[in-house]
């Protein structure tokens, strides 16, 4: 891999880490404990959206 590809990957990993941190920071303790081990920000967002947006729709 080239240096530019490695740097781009590191940048994306950092952005994803920040995204996860911001989402988790806004959760109550009980929810934080349930979702703190998600791998990516998208995975975390999708799980929370599936769980709570369907509740709001009813």
Image: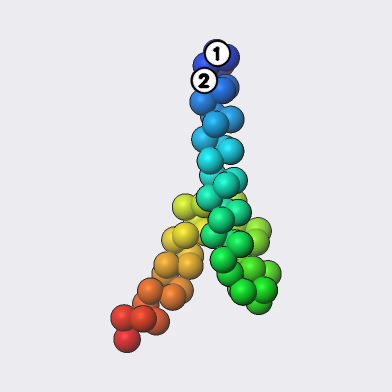
Q: Residue at x 57, y 47 (%)?
A: 18
Q: Is residue 40 visible?
A: no
* Rendering coords of residue 40 (x, y %): 54, 50
Label 2 element class:
helix
Which residue is label 2 attached to?
5
* Rendering coords of residue 35 (x, y %): 61, 65
Residue 50 vs 42, above or below: the answer is below
**Extreme-bottom residue of the structure:** 58
Q: Residue at x 60, y 54 (%)?
A: 21
Location of the C terminus (image quadrant):
bottom left
**Extreme-top residue of the structure:** 2
Label 1 element class:
loop
From the viewer's perspective, is 58 left or right of 26? left
Which residue is label 1 attached to?
2
Q: Is residue 31 visible?
A: yes
Badges 1 and 2: C-beta atoms under 8 Å apart?
yes
Residue 56 vs 36, above or below: the answer is below
């Amino acid at each position: 891999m080239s240096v530019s590809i490695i740097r781009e990957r590191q940048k994306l990993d950092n952005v994803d880490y920040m995204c996860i941190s911001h989402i988790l920071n806004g959760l109550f303790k009980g929810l934080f404990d349930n979702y703190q081990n998600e791998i990516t920000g998208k995975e975390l967002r999708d799980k929370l959206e599936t769980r709570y947006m369907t509740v709001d729709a009813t």
